[in-house]
Image (tube, helix red, strand yellow):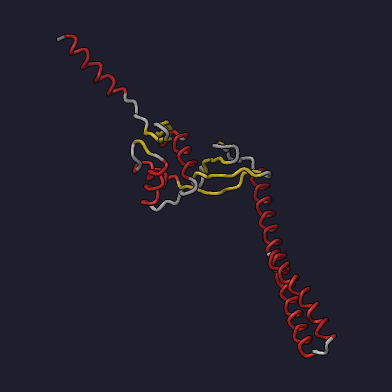
Amino acid sequence: MYEKVQFLADACRNLEFAKTKLYEVGFEDIAKKIEEIQNDIYRRIGFLRERDKKEELREIAKTIKEIEKQERFNNNDSSPNVTWITENIGYYYDINERKYVLVRNRPYGPVTIKTFDLSDLHRLNEKLPDKATVNDLIRVAEEIGLKVRGHAQYLMRILANEVRFNRELRVQGRLLVLARVEEYSLADEVRKQLLVEKDVVR
């Protein structure tokens, strides 16, 4: 926006010089036309500056709303406990909405950037291969209509951190893999032990 205003202002200065010279040599009709063009440019500069000012005010209003929202968040005694994935990105589980909420840390507190329904994450988790890369996660998410692109790495950590999804992160070569954890079964363990004892008796 600033570049446009500066360009028009430079044009007006150049036209001013031409207009002055035309008045000096007696071409008043042409000089007046240039003056009309200048006036039109001044109106456009005023419009651009006004529009720029309105955009700035909208940004300020948006920031104020975010601050007010965060103040209500901070004043709430039942504020959720955020698990930080990185220094600036974290998540929490909203038990009432049954959603995982991805947040970004701001100077005035966490701000929501994405939410995931628990039911959607269960569906995603069921369809993922036992060892899923971030590309697998994005592909399967798209298949079930879940938009995760740009947040997939964070979602992998949510699935790994939360016990209900029965996953863990492992390094496989150069890749970070979201692996399904084999469920421990006491009955299976006892059955294996009995088979071993039978072999020993024989």
Q: Is residue 71 above or below residue 163?
A: below
Quarter occupied by the N terminus: bottom right
Position of residue 120 relative to residue 168, above or below, is below
Please name the residue shown 47% across and 47% down the image.
116
From the viewer's side, name the closer residue of 89 and 6: 6
* Residue 164 locus on image (x, y percent): 42, 35
Q: How many marks do you count on the picture?
A: 0
* In this picture, residue 202 sits left or right of residue 125: left
Residue 54, relative to residue 32: is it above or below? above
User: Is residue 94 shown left or right of residue 60?
Assistant: left
Identify the residue at image location x=42%, y=33%: 174
Quarter holding the C terminus is top left
Write the residue at 60% across / 37% down.
87
Residue that lies at the very extreme toward the top in this rendered image: 201
Residue depicted at x 72% and y 71%: 8
**Residue 3 left/right relative to 21:** left
Along the line of sight, the residue nearer the viewer: 89 or 47:
47
Left or right of 104 on screen, residue 136: left
Percent position of residue 21, x then y: 82, 82
Front residue of 142/13: it is 13
Q: Residue furthest right?
A: 24
Residue 185 x/y as whole percent = 32, 25
Q: Residue furthest left?
A: 202
